[in-house]
Image: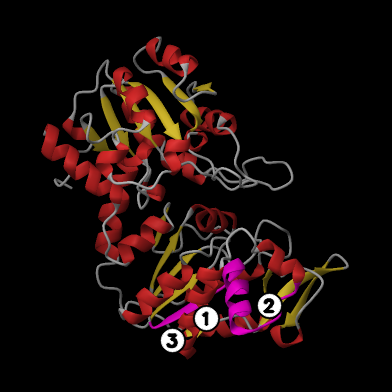
């Protein structure tokens, strides 16, 4: 870990610490209430340590992205963090305005403030390098109010955004405890995965999935890739299956002509190494009903993989020596449609091989099924974990390295 600083390298007493975390949580679509606070609990050790060192802790975080249905403020997050810390966390619904600056200026050592959703700011969605991000409005506005920057947002560490990589060039910086632990553990565990290795890619985000599949199969990192969830539906569509209007509508935000074409190319290139569902589960008259993909389209949206798919995929996972899952197989939050996700995770446990889960929703599902303690490792990051698996640099780690070179310890 000597390539970048950690909390051990600074005297933080009476210092104002800007702490960037990733507490992006799954929400109930109807109530917009947080349904799993695993990511919030994961940052408690870092926050508690900073409080114990008598630092003034200013937290930056995000929830979803602008325009998405689950893009909300951070008030719930503050309340849950306060509950898990057993200490007050003040929520300020502002980021760089006078209200935020006043709250920071009035803090006492040991106090914690959580600012508003950082993705409200336009500069947070700009694509740029570290040096350019260092000149972003977020950085220039908050810089006069902080002494040290700490990044504990492992789940977002694969992204180059100003809240993640902009401060390191301007102020002494360090990783939080979660970040350091994740980097060390994953480099140790996933240096050379044992074969056969299977990747299970699911969830609602589809954009990077075709690229990910091509990389892991071309590079020999995985022997087989199982595609489920909305990503699985998108690949079925790319294979020529008419999944129906209801299932296609859910893909509208993620599926573009570019990544649709990329999916078709991956299927043509890798053939039998990419396994797709052979049936899906829909809700019909209040019941879970399995429909063969050959009998699609259905008027109802596909909410899970079907029983035949579960049996097929379990056999592959049970014979593996390394299994990695990022993203659930279906809408596991809905009663009756958690079956696919749970059964695939159970197969990972039963395989007796190395099993790794990545991403907030995946970790949340594992906790719900009481499987989190039975897999080899649960990572808070999905995209970050995938970046490490692909042996590509994480922008946050690169920024922390630069900060250490510039400011020392």
- Density class for disc 1 (Cα within 10 Å; few <14, some 14-19, many ≥20) is some
Which residue in the structure is indicated by mark 2? 306
Which segment is the magenta one?
A: 223-244
User: Element at badge 2?
Assistant: loop
Badge 3 is on which residue? 270
Circles 2 and 1, Cβ within 8 Å, touching? The answer is: no
Foreground: disc 1 or disc 3: 1
Question: What residue would you read off at disc 1?
Answer: 264
Q: Is residue 332 above or below residue 298?
A: above
Of the pair 281 and 293, the residue shown nearer to us? 293
Residue 286 is left or right of residue 61, and the answer is right
Vertical order, 324 against 61 (above or below):
below
Q: Nearer the viewer, residue 385 or 402?
A: 402
Mark 2 neighbour density, 10 Å: few (under 14) some (14–19) many (20 or more): many
Crowding near the residue tagged with mark 3, few <14, some 14–19, many ≥20 C-alpha atoms within 10 Å: some
Image position of 27 with respect to 92: above or below: below
**Where does the image place residue 398, in percent across and percent down from the top left?**
23, 48
């Amino acid at each position: 870990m000597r390539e970048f600083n950690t909390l051990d390298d600074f005297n933080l007493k009476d210092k104002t610490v800007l702490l960037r975390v990733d507490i992006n949580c799954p929400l109930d679509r109807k109530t917009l209430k947080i349904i799993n606070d695993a990511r919030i609990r994961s940052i408690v050790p870092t926050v508690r340590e900073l409080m114990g060192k008598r630092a003034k802790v200013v937290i930056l975080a995000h929830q979803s992205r602008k325009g998405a249905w689950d893009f909300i403020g951070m008030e719930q997050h503050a309340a849950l963090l306060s509950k898990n810390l057993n200490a007050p966390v003040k929520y300020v619904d502002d980021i760089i305005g006078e209200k935020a600056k006043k709250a920071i200026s009035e803090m006492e050592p040991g106090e914690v403030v959580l600012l508003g959703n950082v993705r409200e700011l336009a500069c947070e969605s700009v694509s740029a390098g570290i040096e350019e991000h260092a000149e972003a409005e977020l950085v220039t506005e908050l810089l006069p109010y902080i002494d040290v920057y700490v990044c504990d947002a492992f789940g977002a560490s694969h992204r180059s955004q100003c809240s993640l990589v902009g401060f390191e060039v301007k102020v002494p910086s360090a990783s939080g405890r979660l970040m350091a632990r994740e980097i060390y553990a994953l480099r140790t565990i996933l240096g050379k995965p044992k074969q056969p290795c299977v990747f299970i890619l699911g969830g609602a985000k589809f954009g990077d999935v075709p690229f990910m599949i091509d990389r892991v199969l071309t590079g020999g990192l995985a022997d087989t890739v199982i595609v489920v969830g909305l990503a699985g539906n998108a690949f079925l569509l790319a294979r020529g299956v008419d999944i129906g209007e209801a299932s296609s509508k859910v893909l509208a935000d993620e599926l573009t002509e570019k990544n649709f074409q990329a999916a078709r190319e991956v299927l043509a290139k890798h053939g039998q190494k990419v396994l797709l569902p052979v049936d899906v589960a829909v809700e019909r008259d209040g019941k879970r009903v399995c429909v063969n993909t050959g009998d699609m389209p259905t008027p109802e949206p596909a909410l899970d993989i079907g029983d035949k798919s579960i049996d097929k995929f379990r056999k592959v996972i049970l014979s593996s020596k390394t299994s990695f899952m990022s993203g659930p197989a279906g809408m596991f939050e809905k009663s009756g449609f958690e079956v696919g996700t749970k059964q695939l995770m159970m197969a990972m446990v039963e395989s007796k091989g190395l099993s790794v889960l990545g991403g907030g929703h995946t970790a949340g599902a594992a906790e719900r099924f009481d499987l989190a303690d039975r897999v080899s490792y649960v990572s808070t990051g999905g995209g970050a974990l995938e970046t490490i698996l692909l042996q590509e640099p994480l922008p946050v780690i690169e920024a922390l390295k630069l900060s250490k070179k510039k400011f020392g310890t």
